[in-house]
Image (cartoon, rainbow, N blue to C red):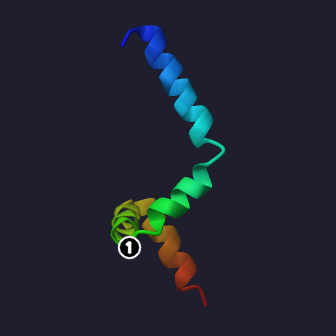
Amino acid sequence: MNGWTKWLVLGGLVLFLVPNRYRLLNLLLGNFLLRKFAVRAAMGIPGIRSKFIQGAFRS
């Protein structure tokens, strides 16, 4: 693909995904294995993990 075609395809993809981002996220996280992988990946990030632990065990 030449430069213009690549940018047009990328722009079209963005125009489709932005309005449907939550529908796509629900579709992906509805699958047990993908959800498990996503949670493991998020918990591997120290900032997200510490925020979750602080919020979950707040007294």
Q: Where is residue 19 in the image (x, y as percent from the top left)?
A: 66, 44
Quarter of the image where the N terminus is located: top left
Up the image or down, 56 lies above or below 15; here it is: below
Looking at the image, is 24 positioned above or below residue 31?
above
> Can you say whether 58 is above or below 23 in the image?
below
Q: Residue furthest right?
A: 19
Tell me where residue 33 appears, x and y as whole percent: 33, 70
**Would you call the spot at circle 1 few (<14 residues within 10 Å), some (14-19), or many (20 or more)?**
few
Give the amino acid type for the residue marked by disc 1 in the picture.
Answer: Phe
Task: Tell me the SS state at disc 1.
Answer: helix
Q: Nearer the viewer, residue 22 or 54?
A: 22
Identify which residue, 57 or 14, lies in the foreground: 14
Q: Please report the residue visible at 61 percent of the width from the left and 90 percent of the height from the top.
A: 59
* Residue at 42% over, 9% down: 3
Q: Is residue 18 left or right of residue 36?
A: right
Q: Which residue is drawn at 50% across and 61% down?
A: 27
Taking 39 as reference, is 27 left or right?
right
Which residue in the protein does label 1 denote? Answer: 32
In the image, is residue 22 above or below residue 40? above
- Residue at 38 percent across and 73 percent down: it is 32
